[in-house]
Image (cartoon, rainbow, N blue to C red):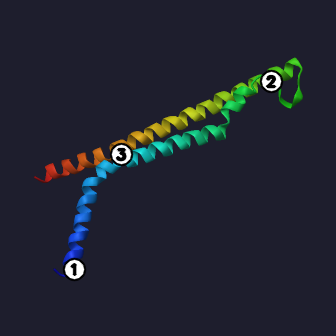
Amino acid sequence: MSLLLQTLRTVLLNVVADFFYFPIWWYAGGLKKQLTGILGSFLARQDALALDIWIKNIATPMYGQYDIQGRIISFIMRLAQIIGRLFILIVWGVLLVAWLIVWVLIPVSVAYFVFIQIRLMV
């Protein structure tokens, strides 16, 4: 057998094997990688927003103003910051979950559209 035929056979076998292995990788290793990335992204966003620090210091007056007006203004400002940062974190979490759903549905939708096209051709 010539080198060209051996190379062609090897390449074609690898392409066929990759084609059939793709769904297994997509929903096993690829999904695990996506989940790890999504969790890392959520935790990084949580760290960047420092929501736990804002909650921990909600009753601490800002700028050393210990009078009643300073305490009230500080509490209201920190509460507004907590609500805004929590909203951003929730939106980020929803976007990450939406991305995960898209990731899971991509191969299914591609297979569906290929099936539709094949059905229309027949």
Give the spatial CA distance, label 3 vs label 1. Answer: 35 Å
Residue at numbered disc 3: 28
Vertical side of 69 occupied by 117: above or below: below
The kind of secondary structure element at disc 3 is loop
Q: Are the residues tagged 3 and 2 within 8 Å (C-beta)?
A: no
SS at mark 1 in the image: helix
- Horizontal placement of 71 versus 121: left or right? right
Quarter of image, res 27? top left
Return the residue at label 1. 4
Nearer the viewer's eye, disc 3 or disc 2? 3
Q: Which residue sits furthest bottom?
A: 2
Q: Position of residue 30 (x, y in %)?
A: 39, 49
Answer with mark 2 or mark 1, whichever residue precedes in sequence. 1
- Looking at the rendered structure, the secondary structure element under dot 2 is helix
Q: Amino acid at mark 3?
A: Ala
On the image, numbered disc 2 is attached to which residue?
73
Q: Which residue shows up at 64% across the image and 31% down it?
A: 84
How far, Cα to Cα, is label 3 from label 2? 51 Å
Q: How many marks?
A: 3
Query: Is 58 in front, or is 14?
Result: 14
Residue furthest front in the image: 1
Residue shown at the point (64%, 33%) measured from the top left: 85
Query: Could you tell me which residue is drawn at 48 percent across and 40 percent down?
Result: 96
Q: Amino acid at mark 1?
A: Leu
